[in-house]
Amino acid sequence: MKYGYTLFSLIAACGPLVAQDLPTMWSADTVTMNCPWDSGETIQTFQGWEAYQTLNDEWNGPVDSTRCLDLFVVVNNSYVQPRIQFDQVDTTRSVFVRVLLDSSSAIPLDSSTIYTLQAGLYPSQNDLLDTSGSCPGALCTGVMAAVQVPDSAGMGSVLRWYTGSYDPFGGFGYPVELCVPTERFASNRLREVILRITSVGAAAGEFVNIDPPILQNMDQWSGVQKLRESVLPQFQTGQFDYFLQGFFGPSFLVMYEDSTYPDAAHQSYLDVSPIPNVAAPTNVTLNLDQYSTMVFQPFTQFRGGLIVGSDSLRHPFSFVNDGDLCMASQIVEVIWSPGSRYVHNGGHVDMDGERCCFLFRKGSTLRINNGVRFDYGAKRRGMLGLRAGCTIDIGANAELVINNMVDMKEDFGATEHQDIILALRDGAKLTFAPGARLFNGNSIGQATQLLVYLDGGSIDITGLPPEDRLKVRVIEVPPVDLGGTMVLGNVGGNRLLLHLASRIDGLALISIMDVGGRAVAQEEVPLVIGPNTVRIEIPTAAPGTYFLRAELEGTSRVERFVVE
């Protein structure tokens, strides 16, 4: 089941939907007509719908006029079944099933609320539909929707796009689900709804049945709680804690409260402060309950509120997620500023938007709690931004699975190359799933790497392409402060090549002694965490047996070797 929409799916299953007026696909809606791009062909379709393919595989590209597609078949001479038949299509390209809306028929939507869009795609066999994300827009099978809102000048309009991917295990019979937040404008209008269907080597006779999209205003069913700073006190459970609980209650919409026009240059912030506020920076926590759903209006953010008496210093902020964050918009970017933390304790973060993103700046933390698995993103959809100096903290027996692109670079103002560093301890695991990517093209010298210290944990990079695996450095940390001491051999007669593994950075004292305990050489060498290869200068030694002693922070290791 697609966990991200548990609440929405339960509503659909347990009661009638209060739906908006999208064109339906009932028997009464059937139309037999000439193909719009080939008058010599006849197609069976539904009033208000079209099915087509394009030459460039974009929904608004030039139509392939050689393909005239039916949208239904008649089963047992009586039942009209909405269906795409792959015998009629070029199976190397997507099929688009589109609601025919224009400026006069676009569907009015209420302002500042949440709509859900649910549809059914049921292939004739398992694994027939492509979910790889390799198609334009990183969506091969799923739904696209566009809401028309006024532009910044108030003279025209723009489209806000939202996407929802296909999940064969979607909740309660809806493998395609999407959340659509509307904005504060008086005019929000649904202008586009497009199902995208892409097959994986469909054979003759294969097909996909369709349940047409249903649009539901969540405010008419369970209610939508509009999250503003002024309403936070009702969710307060302590001076520094808030708890958003929504089991069969309202969904939460993070509101754009600024008076400016919402765009990339004008972000709006939900400031979360202690009540009563204090003059010292103190962590404040916002908890999202297990059965709660949170959606962001475009260009909204979280952050800690200002401390008392300051116009710049803010409280550190933690968001603890047990519920579902819906980030279906193409333009949702949540920036975790210095001192802030995202804590994944369960639930789901849906990143169906191609460019939606969590960005962790220097001093911020991504934490996965003990025993929890966090599947981040989807194949080629969404991004994870990591800036040098952020912390990735994967708990004991927890796992972070990355399915999309990770953008690695230095934080703002850096003047030299820096790496992203994390340690994997106590059964913690980092997995790069197929489709994941590592990108450092915007870092200084394109040199930023992911530096991983294995200290009881594990990493799987097999899902990365070969060129991206080179951007990961894995360092094995020994179980003791100084371990893995080994004499590799003589170099040039009077130099000794050594291997030492360390848990800490520091100066190690290296002593060479003969069998009588007399010192032959002694030298301090710097060690870094992980394996080290060092060279020690020694006088010309007579053939025989010698001992190497390495000391670091009270720990010592002794190794016997022979000079021939």
Image: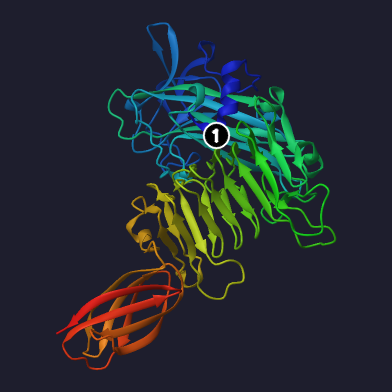
Q: Which residue is mark 1?
A: 4
Q: From what the image shows, is residue 79 above or below residue 322?
A: above
Q: Residue furthest bottom?
A: 540
Q: Nearer the viewer, residue 536 or 284?
A: 536
What residue sits 76% from the left and 40% below the top?
Answer: 236
**Dot 1: what SS?**
helix
Q: Nearer the viewer, residue 399 or 355?
A: 399
Q: From what the image shows, is residue 177 above or below residue 434?
A: above
Q: Nearer the viewer, residue 188 or 221?
A: 221
Q: Residue furthest left?
A: 564
Amino acid type, mark 1: Gly
Give how far across and how far down residue 23 sits, in percent: 58, 21
Rendering quarter of residue 524: bottom left
Drawn side of residue 351 relative to residue 84, left or right:
right
Drawn side of residue 231 relative to residue 177, left or right:
right
Give how far across and how far down residue 508 sits, in percent: 41, 79
Q: Residue furthest right?
A: 309
What residue sits 65% from the left and 23% below the top?
Answer: 20
Q: Is residue 101 visible?
A: no
Give how far across and how far down residue 436 sits, in percent: 42, 50
Drawn side of residue 377 relative to residue 287, left or right:
left
What residue sits 59% from the left and 47% below the top?
Answer: 343
Q: From what the image shows, is residue 218 above or below residue 299?
A: above
Give how far across and how far down residue 307 sits, in percent: 80, 57
Q: From what the image shows, is residue 351 above or below residue 107?
A: below
Q: Is residue 560 visible?
A: yes
Q: Residue furthest front?
A: 516
Q: Quadrant of the C terminus?
A: bottom left
Mark 1 packing: few (<14 Cα in 10 Å), some, or many (20+)? many
